[in-house]
Amino acid sequence: MSPEMVQLVANLALATGMVAATVLVHFWGLLFLTYLMRSGGKRLRLHTSRNHQAALILLVVFGLFGLHTIEIWLYASLYLVLGEMRTLEEALYFSTVTFASLGFGDIVLSPRWRLLSAIEAANGVILFAWSTTFLLGVTTRLRLLEHQWLEPEDKDRPGPGN
């Protein structure tokens, strides 16, 4: 096998491992966020207070941010181990820009490992989409309850079934 093919296989193998690791971090993190939202028997119900619903949204947003931070740190650590970055700050900056698919281009990997960064970008797009879907699901569920926030609490007013 040619040296180029060996390097390609190494890139794909490391990228596959990183995608698997970040997807598992994301999966378990979303399960944990779901558990936290349901803890104490408080599910998203009609009688849930506005403050509780706002806290749930903030929990999800900060939780998702934390998950993405862990995933970015995993890639940054790999770049340091591979010797592609000189400092932790440089590795974190590059990984964040790549994971978010910004691709400023002010810092780049050597041709030896550049395929890895391209796969990190694709991985980041997919995980951001997953996070967006999760957050949309939570906020949609809360919006279904929004009519309770807008309606005055008038128990004498006839409802649809009265």
Image (spheres, rainbow, N blue to C red):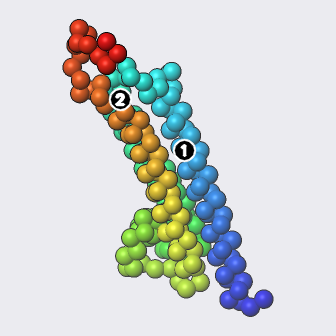
State the residue position of label 2: 145
User: Which residue in the rendered view is the most extreme toward the bottom?
Assistant: 2
Bin the neighbour count of mark 1 within 10 Å (Cα to Cα): few under 14, some 14-19, many 20 and up.
some
Marker count (numbered) = 2
Q: Position of residue 114 (x, y in %)?
A: 54, 80
Above/below status of 143 relative to 72: above
Q: Position of residue 126 (x, y in %)?
A: 51, 61
In-front residue for pair 9/91: 9
Q: Is residue 157 left or right of residue 11?
A: left
- Residue shown at 40% from the left, 74% from the top: 103
Image quadrant holding the N terminus, namely bottom right
The reply to whether residue 80 is in sight is no
The reply to whether residue 29 is in sight is yes
Per the rendering, the mark at residue 53 is none
What element does badge 1 sit on?
Answer: helix
Tell me the amino acid under the disc marked 2: Leu
Above/below status of 47 relative to 14: above
Above/below status of 138 relative to 117: above
User: Which residue in the rendered view is the most extreme toward the right?
Assistant: 1
Dot in front, 2 or 1: 2
Above/below status of 27 relative to 75: above
Tell me the amino acid under the disc marked 1: Gly
Q: Quadrant of residue 157?
A: top left
- Residue shown at 55% from the left, 60% from the top: 74
Bin the neighbour count of mark 2 within 10 Å (Cα to Cα): few under 14, some 14-19, many 20 and up.
some
Q: Position of residue 94 (x, y in %)?
A: 44, 70
Per the rendering, the mark at residue 29 is 1
- Residue shown at 52% from the left, 74% from the top: 118
